[in-house]
Image (cartoon, helix red, strand yellow):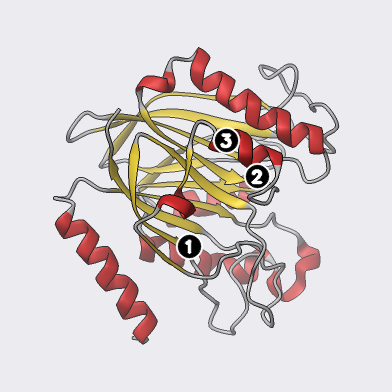
Amino acid sequence: MSTKTLFLLIIQWFLLVFSGGSQSSFMSFNIRYDNKGDMENSWDNRKEELAGMVKYYNPDLLGIQEGLYNQVMYLDEMLPEYDWIGKGRNDGKTKGEFSAIFYKKEKWENIFNTTIWLSETPDSVSKGWDAALERIATMGLFRNLKNKDTIFVINSHFDHIGNVARQKSAELILDKITKMGWNQYRGVVMGDVNSQPFEEPVLIFSKVLKDAFLVAESFTGPVGTFNAFNILQLPDLRIDYIFTQNMNVLHCQHIDVRRNNNLYLSDHLPVFVIMEAGNK
């Protein structure tokens, strides 16, 4: 076991013990869609070790981006302790990329979920504003089976082309939180925002929510989350986020884990946080 791995295990053990067992962990991970053109970085070459990483960090709730249906089904098979919610963005069923949310079913129950399209017509399959592609947000309410606390989790992937679409997507998600009355709950908004911290979508979120990276009591990993499968350069572009509401962030980590051949698990690093309930 490496010194780095041992250090991370000690941190997680410390947070578990001294939070009185009340902490919850969340992971946001753009897993890179199943693209055969990725060659040595293709899904079939990455998927086993990627699932193994999730098992190792064992998040309570995991939001993935870019997962095609076969990828979601693979994770469903490899992670039997989880259930999941979500829809394909191209037809509201199984076609296109998912922003699925996996949750530990022995700890959480899903009491409500919906998928919205990041567009002017969020209740139907649609492309919004200047976006290049259909984009969605998966929204769920989850109840802790032990203490009955309720949290909301929203997982999304913003457009990579449309500047207006990214800004309007952030505004739409915040508007949905308000209109659905989710202001009263603790919650998490996570995903690939395709925006850097100084850009408008992140600034819009930050007016209402807290960026876990900025408020965490401790942090490990590189600053960036997008690696482009480039193993020769440390990631410095941060476009993946976990935002929180009424939660105390104990630890945040950008997981810089490689495959056995030293290649990346995806072209993004997972964002992992450990949190405990804060004041509402």
SS for dot 2 = loop
Residue type, mark 3 in image: Phe
Question: Residue 92: x and y, percent?
Answer: 66, 27
Q: Is residue 136 left or right of residue 63?
A: right
SS for dot 3 = helix
Residue 8 image-quadrant placement: bottom left
Q: Is residue 129 left or right of residue 109?
A: right
The residue at 80%/28% (across/down) is 127
Q: Are marks 3 and 2 in contact (CB under 8 Å)?
A: yes
The residue wearing badge 3 is 205
Q: Tell which tag, 3 or 2, sits nearer the viewer.
A: 3
**In 3D space, how far apart are the residues under numbered discs 2 and 1 (Cα atoms)?**
23 Å
The residue at 67%/57% (across/down) is 32
Q: Nearer the viewer, residue 224 or 131?
A: 224
Q: Are marks 2 and 1 in contact (CB under 8 Å)?
A: no
Q: Tell which tag, 2 or 1, sits nearer the viewer.
A: 2
Q: Is residue 93 visible?
A: no
Question: Residue 110: x and y, percent?
Answer: 37, 29
